[in-house]
Amino acid sequence: MVSEAANAGIDRVLWTEAEIATRVADVASELAADIRRLAEPAVVVGVATGAFLFLADLVRRVDVPLAVDLVRVESYGDGTESSGRPRVTADLKVDVAGKHVVVVEDIVDTGNTVSCLIAHLQKKGALSISVCTFLDKPARRTVDFQLVGGGKFYRGFECPDSFVVGYGMDYAELYRNLPYVGVLKPEMYSKKTDN
Ligand code: PRP
């Protein structure tokens, strides 16, 4: 149960908590089946902060041995738009050289973040690089990133071109804790805030 205060600013729900759980379980099964076939170790790398809920829900349902790590990638923007120049600001702890890496994202939008991470992981000697994103917003793509070493693209849902929040995704660092995904009311971000 989400309180009225937590829901404030949400125009409509796109995916409920139950719909998310069902879809995450399906993606996890597909990922587990693929990892099971690999001869070398697998590392799942979540991109902070947005991926934290998807990462936690996903890996709990992937019942094969794997390492889990986090990276932080930041781009400068006004809160609704990313600048398109991301950089890794907190690096991995796990050595990914000679391993199969699955980058876990909450959303792939322009593709800049994933593209930056793929280059970063390639430099570190990852054997293959896959991307597993909860939401995919192809309408906004500007970067045609290439997966590496037979890596695969997994996605939970295709997202319409709206400002979505919840299930890890924020506006000005709020709404990440909503258990569903909703569209933010335009009036919430049309006025500039201090954040
Ligand atoms: C969001 C999201 C992705 C990225 C996708 O991160 O989590 O990492 O934007 O956008 P792109 O495909 O256009 O690069 P954000 O920079 O908002 O940080 P956050 O995860 O801390 O919310």
Image: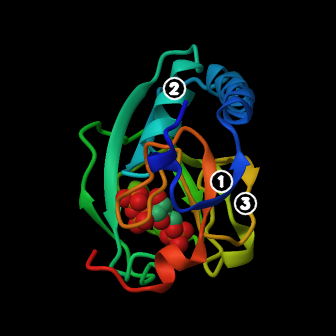
Whether label 3 touches label 1, CB < 8 Å:
yes
In primary-sequence order, the first of circles 3 and 2 is: 2
Residue holding disc 3: 159
The secondary structure type at the circle numbered 2 is helix
Q: Quadrant of residue 68?
A: top left
Rendered image: mark on residue 59:
2
Q: Provide the secondary structure element on which disc 1 rests.
A: strand
- Say which of marks 1 and 2 sits in front: 1
- Return the disc, 3 or 1, that comes first in the chain's sequence: 1
Q: Is residue 160 above or below residue 100?
A: below
What percent of the width, then of the height, locates residue 23? 73, 33
* 1 or 2: tag closer to the N-terminus: 2
67 vs 54, nearest the viewer: 54
Q: Position of residue 83 (x, y in %)?
A: 42, 84
Residue 103 versus residue 122: which sits nearer the camera? 103
Q: Amino acid at mark 2?
A: Val
Above/below status of 8 relative to 83: above
Question: In x, y percent, where is residue 114?
Answer: 51, 63
The residue at 46%/23% (across/down) is: 66
Q: Mark 1, residues whose alpha carbon is within 10 Å: few (<14), some, or many (≥20)?
A: some
Q: Looking at the image, which residue is at 49% across and 73% down?
A: 188
